[in-house]
């Protein structure tokens, strides 16, 4: 299962609060595609299936479907906001290679 750094959890909580909808969770998924074979997908979701893997990071609930959970085992979601870079990034020990943008892997 993917873990969130404190910075990522804080930013996700802030974004969920801006949405203004109760019960939102961050869904992280791996989909076929991207320039390296698989791509990451993140979005807010209220529908949680019985088979989904869930984890709580403070007030943030993260949901991952079972097939994506296998590919995200040991991965970390981080958030950086600096002069050089702003945004989320995933460090995934299961990725053998990734593209230059960091959004896809194989």
Image (cartoon, rainbow, N blue to C red):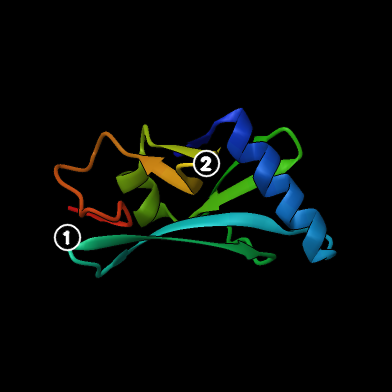
Residue drawn at x 45%, y 39% as measured from the top left = 2
Q: Where's residue 13, x and y in %?
A: 73, 46
Please indicate whether residue 43 sits to the left or right of residue 40 in the image. Answer: right
Residue located beneath label 2 in the image? 83
Query: Residue at 30% of width from left, 47% of height from top?
Result: 71
Q: Residues within 10 Å of mark 2 (few under 14, many from 20)?
A: few
Where residue 73 appears, as percent x and y from the top left, is 36, 37
* Residue 103, position as x, y percentages in the image: 33, 57
Going 55% across and 57% down the picture, which residue do you hit?
27
On the image, the x and y values in percent for residue 62 come to 59, 47
* Secondary element at tag 2: loop
**To which quarter of the image does residue 60 belong?**
top right
Q: Are marks 1 and 2 in contact (CB under 8 Å)?
A: no
The N terminus appears in which quarter of the rendering?
top left
**Which numbered circle lies on residue 36?**
1
Give the SS element for disc 1.
loop
Q: Which mark is residue 103?
A: none
Residue located at (31% from left, 61% from top)? 39
């Amino acid at each position: 299962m993917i873990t969130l750094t404190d910075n990522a959890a804080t930013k996700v909580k802030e974004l969920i609060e801006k949405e203004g909808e109760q019960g939102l969770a961050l869904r992280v998924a791996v989909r076929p595609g991207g320039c390296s074979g698989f791509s990451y997908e993140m979005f807010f979701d209220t529908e949680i299936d019985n088979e989904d893997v869930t984890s709580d990071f403070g007030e943030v609930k993260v949901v991952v479907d079972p097939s994506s959970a296998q590919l995200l085992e040991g991965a970390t979601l981080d958030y950086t906001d600096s002069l050089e870079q702003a945004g989320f990034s995933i460090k995934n020990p299961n990725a053998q290679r990734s593209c230059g943008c960091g959004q896809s892997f194989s």
